Amino acid sequence: GLVAAPAHAEFYAIDDPADASASLSDIYGLEANHGSANLLVKVRFNELVRSSAAGLSVFIDTDPDARGPEYVLSSGLGDGTDYVLTRAEGWQGSDSRVDCDYSARPKWRKDVFRTVISRRCLGTPSTVRVSVKMVDQADGSHPVVDWAPKRHRWSLPMASGLGV
């Protein structure tokens, strides 16, 4: 169910159905908070494990008039993986790394991936929208892909507000 406020809320949350059951990293929920200083995104999973071969992309839209995302934070979900914020090229990352303050990390015991991105990284937009994609290549035969809210779809626009 959707737990978001009107069209320009500061906070967005949605539950995601069990639609990638072939992966332990099935996305169960997405939360985003567009605060005055940072964008906080939390992605909840069925079961997040240190040995995960899955990866996650957090797409960020800062220009509603332009098609697709402007930024993407890419990360592995297993232990020892790294993360990077880049400018987006379509619905993919690029070699154009964004040099600013951001952090990301999986919390395996809580089955959550959490990222905090400074609004300065994003050009201090008045609103943002987010979308996330998990890809798990665990068995090598075919990738398991899960999107929240849906493939190439966005959260509601979130205006910058208090907190975070």
Image (cartoon, rainbow, N blue to C red):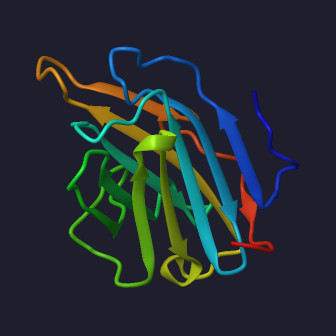
Residue drawn at x 33%, y 22% is 23
Q: Quick check: 17 above or below 122?
A: above
Q: Is residue 112 above or below residue 75?
A: above
Left or right: 141, with 129 as reference point: left
Image spot of residue 85 (x, y percent): 36, 68
Instruction: Out of 60 and 163, give the one closest to the viewer.
Output: 163
Q: In the picture provided, is 12 more to the left or to the right than 133? A: right
Q: Residue furthest front?
A: 109
* Residue drawn at x 19%, y 26% as measured from the top left: 138
Displayed quadrant of residue 65? bottom right
Q: Is residue 162 above or below residue 68?
A: below
Question: Looking at the rendering, in which quadrant would you find the C terminus?
Answer: bottom right
Q: Where is residue 40? Give x, y as percent.
A: 59, 63
Spot occupied by residue 117 in the image (x, y as percentages of width and height): 51, 71
Q: Please tell me how many numbered marks the rendered image carries.
A: 0
Q: Residue furthest left?
A: 140
Q: Position of residue 58 (x, y in %)?
A: 45, 53
Q: Which residue appears farthest toward the right when viewing the image?
A: 6
Q: Residue at x 75, y 27 (%)?
A: 1
**Observer able to see residue 88:** yes
Query: Against 86, is 92 above or below?
Result: above
Residue 55 placement: quadrant: top left
- Which residue is drawn at the image coordinates 42% and 70% (left, top)? 103
Residue 68 can be seen, yes or no: no
